[in-house]
Image (tube, grey):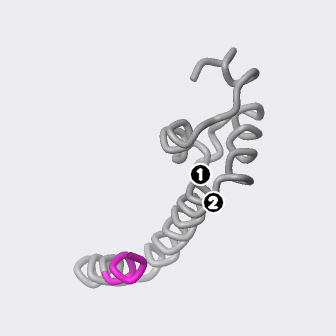
Amino acid sequence: MSQQQNKTQKFDCADIEKMAQQYLDCQLDENAQKHFEEHLEYCLPCDKKIQFEVKLKEIVRSKGKEDLPEKSFESKVKSILDGLS
């Protein structure tokens, strides 16, 4: 979506999908972030997806700080991911 479109149109689910990682990494400009969050307010599926991504990042970040052998870390992450689906 172009900058001009950002100012005049709301985001749809495809836009949210494309921009999710930028949103999670706080890389959207103020206007795009506003439209992104407005979409999440009325679209439960997109809101749930973003909530899932936030929790996943938190889990990976916290587990990544533990002093675990590499294989153990991989199996724990896989176990967590399997439990979320």
Q: Which residue is mark 1?
A: 24
Q: Nearer the viewer, residue 24 or 35?
A: 35
| Residue at the image point whose x is 26% and y is 77% from the top | 70
Query: Looking at the image, is 53 positioned above or below residue 81?
Result: above
* Horizontal arrangement in the rendering, residue 34 relative to residue 19 (left or right): right
- Mark 2: which amino acid? Leu
Mark number displayed over residue 73: none
Q: CA distance from mark 2 to mark 1?
A: 17 Å
For label 2, the crowd category at 10 Å Cα-Cα, with few meaning under 14, some 14 to 19 and many 20 or more, is few
The quadrant where residue 41 appears: bottom right
Residue sitting at x 45%, y 78%: 63
**Quarter placement of the N terminus:** top right
Crowding near the residue tagged with mark 1, few <14, some 14–19, many ≥20 C-alpha atoms within 10 Å: some
Which of label 2 and label 1 is nearer to you?
Answer: 2
Q: Position of residue 44 (x, y in %)?
A: 63, 60
Q: Kindly state the secondary structure of the residue where label 1 is placed.
A: helix
In reply to whether residue 81 is colored magenta, the answer given is yes
Q: Tell me the element at label 2.
A: helix
Instruction: Report if the CB atoms under discs 2 and 1 are less than 8 Å apart.
Output: no
Above or below, 41 against 30 in this view is below
Residue at (45, 81) in percent of width and height: 66
Dominant secondary structure (helix, strand or loop) of the stretch shown in magenta: helix
Q: Residues in magenta?
A: 79-85
Q: Tell me where residue 65 appears, x and y as whole percent.
A: 48, 75
Q: Position of residue 16 (x, y in %)?
A: 56, 42
> Which residue appears farthest toward the top when viewing the image?
4
Amino acid at the residue labelled 1: Leu
Q: In front here: 10 or 23?
A: 10
Q: Residue at x 54, y 40 (%)?
A: 19
Q: Which residue is mark 2?
A: 44
Q: Upstream in the sequence, badge 2 or badge 1?
A: 1
